[in-house]
Image (spheres, rainbow, N blue to C red):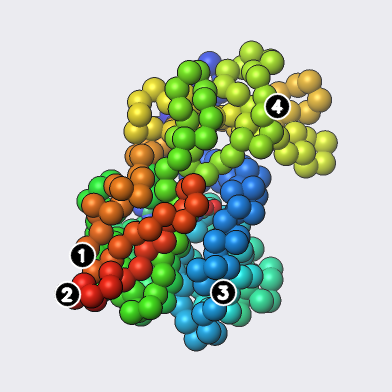
Amino acid sequence: MSGPHGVWRGGEAVLQDSYGAMAEFHDLFMVEPWDELRSHVRAAFGGLPAEAIIVEIGAGSGIGTRVIAQETRARVFALEPDLVMRAILTARVADDPELASRVTVVAGAVPADLGRLPERVDGFVCAHMLGHLAESDRRALFAWLATHLSDDGTGLVTVHWPRREVGGSPDETNGANDAGGGNDADGSGGDVVEVRTLGEYEYRARHHAPDRPDESRSSYEVWRGEVMLRRYTFTSAWRIVTTEVISTDLAASLSIEPSGSHVALIRRTADAPDA
Ligand SMILES: C[S@@+](CC[C@H](N)C(=O)[O-])C[C@H]1O[C@@H](n2cnc3c(N)ncnc32)[C@H](O)[C@@H]1O
Protein backbone atom coordinates (compact mmCIF):
# COMPACT_ATOMS: atom_id res chain seq x y z
CA MET A 1 0.00 0.00 0.00
CA SER A 2 1.24 3.49 -0.72
CA GLY A 3 -0.34 6.90 -1.27
CA PRO A 4 -1.57 9.82 0.80
CA HIS A 5 -3.31 7.73 3.47
CA GLY A 6 -1.13 4.70 4.06
CA VAL A 7 2.22 2.99 3.64
CA TRP A 8 3.61 -0.40 4.53
CA ARG A 9 6.41 -0.02 7.06
CA GLY A 10 8.27 -3.15 8.13
CA GLY A 11 5.35 -5.41 7.23
CA GLU A 12 2.84 -3.26 9.05
CA ALA A 13 0.17 -0.98 7.58
CA VAL A 14 0.71 2.59 8.80
CA LEU A 15 -2.36 4.69 8.11
CA GLN A 16 -2.67 8.46 8.29
CA ASP A 17 -5.98 10.23 8.92
CA SER A 18 -7.90 7.32 7.48
CA TYR A 19 -10.91 6.35 9.55
CA GLY A 20 -12.07 3.99 6.85
CA ALA A 21 -8.95 1.92 7.27
CA MET A 22 -9.55 1.40 11.00
CA ALA A 23 -13.34 1.38 10.95
CA GLU A 24 -13.19 -2.40 11.32
CA PHE A 25 -11.89 -1.90 14.86
CA HIS A 26 -13.58 1.30 16.03
CA ASP A 27 -16.74 -0.23 17.47
CA LEU A 28 -14.89 -2.90 19.42
CA PHE A 29 -13.14 -0.37 21.60
CA MET A 30 -15.90 2.21 22.08
CA VAL A 31 -18.22 0.15 24.25
CA GLU A 32 -16.91 1.40 27.58
CA PRO A 33 -16.70 5.11 26.64
CA TRP A 34 -20.36 4.98 25.60
CA ASP A 35 -21.38 3.04 28.71
CA GLU A 36 -19.85 5.95 30.64
CA LEU A 37 -21.61 8.56 28.48
CA ARG A 38 -25.04 6.97 28.69
CA SER A 39 -26.12 8.65 31.96
CA HIS A 40 -24.93 12.04 30.63
CA VAL A 41 -26.95 11.52 27.46
CA ARG A 42 -30.02 10.59 29.52
CA ALA A 43 -29.64 13.65 31.76
CA ALA A 44 -29.18 16.01 28.81
CA PHE A 45 -31.79 14.67 26.39
CA GLY A 46 -34.05 12.26 28.28
CA GLY A 47 -36.78 14.87 28.67
CA LEU A 48 -36.96 15.90 25.00
CA PRO A 49 -40.26 15.26 23.21
CA ALA A 50 -40.60 13.12 20.09
CA GLU A 51 -40.63 16.12 17.75
CA ALA A 52 -37.28 17.45 19.07
CA ILE A 53 -34.12 17.12 16.98
CA ILE A 54 -30.63 16.11 18.11
CA VAL A 55 -27.68 16.32 15.74
CA GLU A 56 -24.71 14.08 16.33
CA ILE A 57 -21.55 15.42 14.73
CA GLY A 58 -18.97 12.80 13.65
CA ALA A 59 -21.22 9.88 14.58
CA GLY A 60 -18.67 7.27 13.50
CA SER A 61 -19.97 3.71 13.41
CA GLY A 62 -23.10 4.64 15.36
CA ILE A 63 -22.38 2.98 18.67
CA GLY A 64 -23.19 6.32 20.32
CA THR A 65 -26.06 7.03 17.94
CA ARG A 66 -27.76 3.96 19.35
CA VAL A 67 -27.19 5.15 22.94
CA ILE A 68 -28.60 8.58 22.10
CA ALA A 69 -31.68 7.07 20.41
CA GLN A 70 -32.21 4.72 23.36
CA GLU A 71 -32.06 7.55 25.89
CA THR A 72 -34.33 10.06 24.18
CA ARG A 73 -37.56 10.11 22.18
CA ALA A 74 -36.15 12.83 19.90
CA ARG A 75 -35.23 12.36 16.26
CA VAL A 76 -31.49 12.08 15.58
CA PHE A 77 -29.53 13.38 12.59
CA ALA A 78 -26.13 11.62 12.54
CA LEU A 79 -23.49 13.37 10.41
CA GLU A 80 -20.45 11.30 9.40
CA PRO A 81 -17.90 12.03 6.65
CA ASP A 82 -16.10 8.70 6.38
CA LEU A 83 -17.68 6.25 3.97
CA VAL A 84 -16.73 3.08 5.84
CA MET A 85 -17.74 4.42 9.26
CA ARG A 86 -20.97 5.66 7.71
CA ALA A 87 -21.64 2.27 6.12
CA ILE A 88 -21.46 0.63 9.57
CA LEU A 89 -23.68 3.39 11.00
CA THR A 90 -26.24 2.96 8.21
CA ALA A 91 -26.33 -0.82 8.63
CA ARG A 92 -26.79 -0.44 12.39
CA VAL A 93 -29.71 1.95 11.88
CA ALA A 94 -31.25 -0.17 9.12
CA ASP A 95 -31.11 -3.32 11.26
CA ASP A 96 -33.16 -1.87 14.10
CA PRO A 97 -36.72 -0.70 13.37
CA GLU A 98 -36.68 1.65 16.37
CA LEU A 99 -33.50 3.35 15.11
CA ALA A 100 -34.72 3.35 11.51
CA SER A 101 -37.87 5.22 12.51
CA ARG A 102 -35.95 8.11 14.13
CA VAL A 103 -32.32 8.26 12.92
CA THR A 104 -31.30 10.00 9.69
CA VAL A 105 -27.75 9.37 8.49
CA VAL A 106 -26.22 12.41 6.80
CA ALA A 107 -23.03 12.21 4.71
CA GLY A 108 -20.72 15.13 5.32
CA ALA A 109 -18.13 16.89 7.42
CA VAL A 110 -18.21 20.02 9.53
CA PRO A 111 -18.11 22.84 8.84
CA ALA A 112 -18.60 22.41 5.09
CA ASP A 113 -21.76 20.31 5.23
CA LEU A 114 -23.61 21.86 8.18
CA GLY A 115 -26.22 23.07 5.70
CA ARG A 116 -27.35 19.43 5.31
CA LEU A 117 -28.61 19.44 8.90
CA PRO A 118 -32.03 20.69 10.05
CA GLU A 119 -32.58 24.41 10.60
CA ARG A 120 -33.63 23.99 14.24
CA VAL A 121 -31.61 21.87 16.64
CA ASP A 122 -32.77 21.04 20.18
CA GLY A 123 -29.65 19.15 21.15
CA PHE A 124 -26.25 18.26 19.75
CA VAL A 125 -23.52 15.74 20.53
CA CYS A 126 -19.84 16.00 19.64
CA ALA A 127 -18.32 12.85 21.15
CA HIS A 128 -14.66 11.97 20.75
CA MET A 129 -14.34 14.10 17.64
CA LEU A 130 -13.54 17.73 18.45
CA GLY A 131 -9.81 16.91 18.53
CA HIS A 132 -10.00 16.26 14.79
CA LEU A 133 -11.10 19.81 14.05
CA ALA A 134 -8.79 22.76 13.48
CA GLU A 135 -9.60 25.80 15.61
CA SER A 136 -11.23 27.61 12.67
CA ASP A 137 -13.47 24.60 11.97
CA ARG A 138 -14.47 24.29 15.65
CA ARG A 139 -15.34 27.96 15.70
CA ALA A 140 -17.38 27.66 12.50
CA LEU A 141 -19.22 24.68 14.00
CA PHE A 142 -20.04 26.51 17.22
CA ALA A 143 -21.06 29.64 15.31
CA TRP A 144 -23.52 27.53 13.29
CA LEU A 145 -24.83 25.93 16.48
CA ALA A 146 -25.25 29.35 18.10
CA THR A 147 -27.67 30.32 15.35
CA HIS A 148 -29.52 26.97 15.13
CA LEU A 149 -29.78 25.76 18.73
CA SER A 150 -33.22 26.31 20.21
CA ASP A 151 -33.46 28.62 23.22
CA ASP A 152 -33.57 25.79 25.74
CA GLY A 153 -31.33 23.46 23.70
CA THR A 154 -28.33 21.58 25.12
CA GLY A 155 -25.08 20.37 23.59
CA LEU A 156 -23.06 17.50 25.02
CA VAL A 157 -19.37 17.41 24.13
CA THR A 158 -16.51 15.21 25.26
CA VAL A 159 -13.39 17.11 26.21
CA HIS A 160 -9.77 16.19 26.65
CA TRP A 161 -8.69 14.39 29.78
CA PRO A 162 -5.38 12.70 30.54
CA ARG A 163 -6.19 9.06 31.31
CA ARG A 164 -3.00 7.11 31.58
CA GLU A 165 0.70 7.16 31.00
CA VAL A 166 2.28 5.68 27.89
CA GLY A 167 6.05 5.93 27.49
CA GLY A 168 6.19 8.43 30.31
CA SER A 169 3.89 11.08 28.85
CA PRO A 170 0.18 11.61 29.35
CA ASP A 171 -1.97 9.97 26.72
CA GLU A 172 -4.53 12.24 25.08
CA THR A 173 -7.29 9.85 24.33
CA ASN A 174 -9.83 10.21 21.53
CA GLY A 175 -12.24 7.92 23.28
CA ALA A 176 -10.71 4.48 23.18
CA ASN A 177 -10.24 3.31 26.70
CA ASP A 178 -7.87 1.44 28.89
CA ALA A 179 -10.09 -1.23 30.35
CA GLY A 180 -7.90 -4.17 29.43
CA GLY A 181 -4.55 -3.01 30.74
CA GLY A 182 -1.29 -4.63 29.76
CA ASN A 183 2.43 -4.27 29.84
CA ASP A 184 3.74 -4.84 26.36
CA ALA A 185 4.59 -8.42 27.25
CA ASP A 186 5.08 -9.47 23.64
CA GLY A 187 7.39 -6.56 22.88
CA SER A 188 5.44 -5.27 19.89
CA GLY A 189 5.32 -1.72 21.25
CA GLY A 190 2.67 0.26 23.14
CA ASP A 191 0.50 -0.97 25.98
CA VAL A 192 -2.44 -3.24 25.31
CA VAL A 193 -5.27 -1.00 26.40
CA GLU A 194 -8.20 -3.24 25.58
CA VAL A 195 -8.80 -6.73 24.33
CA ARG A 196 -11.94 -8.10 22.69
CA THR A 197 -12.49 -11.69 21.63
CA LEU A 198 -14.73 -12.49 18.68
CA GLY A 199 -14.94 -16.16 17.82
CA GLU A 200 -11.41 -17.56 17.65
CA TYR A 201 -9.72 -14.20 17.21
CA GLU A 202 -8.54 -11.71 19.78
CA TYR A 203 -8.49 -8.02 18.90
CA ARG A 204 -6.02 -5.78 20.73
CA ALA A 205 -5.87 -1.99 20.74
CA ARG A 206 -2.67 -0.26 21.76
CA HIS A 207 -2.39 3.48 22.24
CA HIS A 208 1.06 4.93 21.77
CA ALA A 209 2.75 8.03 23.02
CA PRO A 210 2.40 10.32 19.99
CA ASP A 211 5.42 11.74 18.17
CA ARG A 212 3.81 15.18 18.36
CA PRO A 213 1.45 16.67 20.96
CA ASP A 214 -1.24 17.30 18.33
CA GLU A 215 -1.33 13.72 17.12
CA SER A 216 -2.92 10.46 18.21
CA ARG A 217 -1.39 7.08 17.36
CA SER A 218 -2.99 3.69 17.95
CA SER A 219 -2.37 0.17 16.75
CA TYR A 220 -4.94 -2.54 16.22
CA GLU A 221 -3.94 -6.18 16.11
CA VAL A 222 -5.75 -9.40 15.31
CA TRP A 223 -4.40 -12.51 17.08
CA ARG A 224 -5.20 -16.19 16.83
CA GLY A 225 -3.71 -17.86 19.89
CA GLU A 226 -0.04 -16.87 20.01
CA VAL A 227 0.08 -15.73 16.38
CA MET A 228 -0.54 -12.13 15.33
CA LEU A 229 -2.39 -12.25 12.02
CA ARG A 230 -2.62 -8.54 11.23
CA ARG A 231 -1.52 -5.22 12.67
CA TYR A 232 -2.42 -1.67 11.63
CA THR A 233 -1.12 1.57 13.04
CA PHE A 234 -3.36 4.59 12.72
CA THR A 235 -2.12 8.14 13.11
CA SER A 236 -4.32 11.20 13.05
CA ALA A 237 -4.28 14.86 13.93
CA TRP A 238 -5.73 15.17 17.43
CA ARG A 239 -5.73 18.56 19.10
CA ILE A 240 -6.12 18.92 22.83
CA VAL A 241 -9.57 20.43 23.25
CA THR A 242 -10.46 21.23 26.85
CA THR A 243 -13.50 22.98 28.32
CA GLU A 244 -11.36 26.14 28.48
CA VAL A 245 -10.40 25.88 24.81
CA ILE A 246 -14.05 25.48 23.82
CA SER A 247 -15.10 28.43 25.95
CA THR A 248 -12.82 30.63 23.83
CA ASP A 249 -14.31 29.11 20.65
CA LEU A 250 -17.90 29.84 21.56
CA ALA A 251 -19.96 32.75 20.40
CA ALA A 252 -21.12 35.00 23.27
CA SER A 253 -24.58 33.48 23.09
CA LEU A 254 -23.30 30.02 24.14
CA SER A 255 -21.62 28.94 27.38
CA ILE A 256 -19.91 25.72 28.40
CA GLU A 257 -19.97 24.01 31.81
CA PRO A 258 -18.08 20.87 32.83
CA SER A 259 -20.24 17.89 33.73
CA GLY A 260 -17.93 15.20 35.07
CA SER A 261 -14.32 14.52 34.16
CA HIS A 262 -14.51 14.53 30.37
CA VAL A 263 -17.99 15.74 29.49
CA ALA A 264 -19.22 19.30 29.19
CA LEU A 265 -22.58 20.81 28.40
CA ILE A 266 -23.15 23.80 26.13
CA ARG A 267 -26.24 25.95 26.52
CA ARG A 268 -27.46 29.41 25.68
CA THR A 269 -25.89 32.10 27.84
CA ALA A 270 -28.49 33.63 30.12
CA ASP A 271 -29.17 37.24 29.09
CA ALA A 272 -26.69 37.15 26.18
CA PRO A 273 -27.47 39.99 23.72
CA ASP A 274 -28.14 37.63 20.76
CA ALA A 275 -29.57 34.73 22.83
C1 LIG B 1 -13.01 8.83 17.34
S1 LIG B 1 -14.30 8.79 16.14
C2 LIG B 1 -15.72 8.99 17.22
C3 LIG B 1 -16.98 8.49 16.59
C4 LIG B 1 -18.21 8.63 17.49
N1 LIG B 1 -18.52 10.01 17.77
C5 LIG B 1 -18.01 7.85 18.76
O1 LIG B 1 -17.89 8.47 19.83
O2 LIG B 1 -17.99 6.60 18.69
C6 LIG B 1 -14.19 10.40 15.37
C7 LIG B 1 -15.18 10.57 14.23
O3 LIG B 1 -15.14 11.93 13.81
C8 LIG B 1 -15.30 11.95 12.42
N2 LIG B 1 -14.81 13.24 11.89
C9 LIG B 1 -13.53 13.60 11.66
N3 LIG B 1 -13.50 14.85 11.12
C10 LIG B 1 -14.79 15.27 11.02
C11 LIG B 1 -15.42 16.45 10.53
N4 LIG B 1 -14.70 17.47 10.03
N5 LIG B 1 -16.77 16.52 10.57
C12 LIG B 1 -17.51 15.51 11.06
N6 LIG B 1 -16.96 14.36 11.54
C13 LIG B 1 -15.62 14.24 11.52
C14 LIG B 1 -14.51 10.75 11.94
O4 LIG B 1 -14.86 10.37 10.60
C15 LIG B 1 -14.87 9.73 13.00
O5 LIG B 1 -16.00 8.97 12.63
Does the beta carbon of the residue at mark 4 sit less than 8 Å from ligand 1?
Answer: no
* Residue at the (23%, 52%) spot, across then down: 248
- Disc 3 vs disc 2: which is toward the camera? 2
Instruction: Give the amino acid type for the residue marked by disc 2 in the picture.
Output: Pro
Instruction: Give the amino acid type for the residue marked by disc 4 in the picture.
Output: Leu
Q: Which residue is mark 3?
A: 46
Q: Few, some or many C-alpha atoms within 10 Å of disc 1 (few <14, some 14-19, many ≥20)?
A: some
- Above or below, 137 relative to 73: above
Q: Which residue is mark 4?
A: 229
Instruction: Give the amino acid type for the residue marked by disc 3 in the picture.
Output: Gly
* Residue at the (65%, 49%) spot, across then down: 31
Judge whether residue 107 can be spotted in this image: no
Disc 1 + disc 2, Cβ < 8 Å: yes
Rendered image quadrant of residue 118 = bottom left
Q: Which residue is mark 1?
A: 252
**Lower position in the chain sequence, tag 3 or tag 2:** 3
Report the Cα–Cα distance between label 3 and label 4: 43 Å
